[in-house]
Amino acid sequence: MSSPVSKQSPFTWSLILVLLGTAIHLVLGFTTELSVDEAHYALYANHLAWSYFDHPPLVGWIQWPLVAINAPDGILRLIPITLWMISCPIGLPNRRSTQYVLLQSFTVYKKS
């Protein structure tokens, strides 16, 4: 007799882990301060330009509306978390993509 857990496809497991990873990212996003990179992105959003020393300008542009209204750190992280969540399922039927998503789902916090 097989359990319902063993009948799940890799795609289903990937989606479950992406949702779990998103929940963890949201909890940590509202409870920790900005990392060095995230602080730079917020600085870029304060001073919009066509390019920065080693980053393309989109990083600052997508954060600009939230920085302009002085949104809290957790809210500033909603855009990157949303973009991460959207990009994870792209190409999931491919086995290598599924493995990548599973690996990325467990990457929770990078201390700089």
Image (cartoon, rainbow, N blue to C red):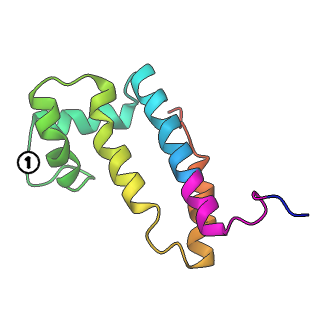
Q: Is residue 57 above or below residue 93?
A: above
Q: Does residue 73 show up magenta in the picture?
A: no
Under tag 1, what secondary structure?
loop
Query: On the picture, is 51 further left or further right than 101?
Result: left
Q: Which residue is mark 1?
A: 49
From the viewer's perspective, is 11 left or right of 72? right
Foreground residue, 103 or 38? 103
Nearer to the camera, 67 or 41? 67
As drawn, 21 above or below 32: below
Quadrant in which residue 42 is drawn: top left
At 57% from the left edge and 79% from the top edge, which residue is drawn?
A: 94
Which residue is more in the foreground, 25 or 13?
13
For image coordinates 11% across by 38% down, the residue present is 65
Q: How many marks?
A: 1
Residue 11 colored in magenta in the image:
yes
Q: Position of residue 29 (x, y in %)?
A: 42, 29
Quadrant in the picture for the N terminus? bottom right
In the rendered image, the residue lying farthest to the front is 1
Neighbor class of circle 1 (other Cα within 10 Å; few <14, some 14-19, many 20+) is few
Q: Quadrant of residue 86?
A: bottom left
- The spot of residue 37 in percent (x, y) is 36, 38
Read off the magenta span.
4-16
In this picture, residue 8 sits left or right of residue 88: right
Residue 48 vertical placement versus 98 (above, below): above
Residue extending furthest toward the bottom? 94
Q: Residue at x 55, y 40 (%)?
A: 108
Give amino acid for label 1: Ala
Q: Looking at the picture, how far across and down is residue 99, in whole percent?
A: 63, 66
Where is residue 69, by image quadrant? Answer: top left
